Amino acid sequence: QDDLSQIEVRQLCEKLPEEERILFIKRYFEGFDSTQLSAMYKLPPSTIRSRLASARRKLRMYNPELENQKKENRDSNKM
């Protein structure tokens, strides 16, 4: 299987700055949304979204396979 496992993504997360890593894990592994994270960390929702976008961008740089998965998911949604 070409998809990265959750374990592999978590390992890649270790390379992220702490503030981005924590938000990414809470959002994508623990299921919190940006509004909940905003309340938890007393940050504007736009800051949460920006940090999550930065984390996703960095993870794609660390492993180009993530970019390929993103494109495949986007293409399969068009059908």
Image (tube, grey):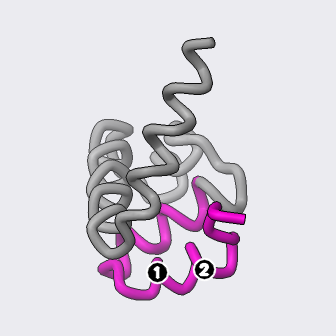
Q: Secondary structure at mark 2?
A: helix
Disc 2 to disc 1, C-alpha distance: 6 Å
Chief SS of the magenta region: helix
Q: Can you say whether 46 is above or below 53 in the image?
A: above
Residue at the spot of label 2: 8
Circle 1 crowding by C-alpha within 10 Å: few under 14, some 14–19, many from 20:
some
Residue nearest the observer in this picture, 40 or 17: 17
Residue nearest the observer in this picture, 57 or 63: 63
Q: Which mark is residue 12?
A: 1
Measuring 44% from the left and 38% from the top, which residue is drawn there?
A: 71
Residue nearest the observer in this picture, 9 or 65: 65
Q: x and y percent of residue 69 in the render?
A: 51, 49
Q: x and y percent of residue 78 in the render?
A: 55, 14
Q: Can residue 43 be found in the magenta stretch?
A: no
Kind of residue at disc 1? Leu
Q: Secondary structure at mark 1?
A: helix
Q: Can you say whether 19 is above or below 51 in the image?
A: below
Circle 2 crowding by C-alpha within 10 Å: few under 14, some 14–19, many from 20:
few
Q: x and y percent of residue 49 in the render?
A: 36, 43
Residue stretch rendered in magenta on the structure: 1-27
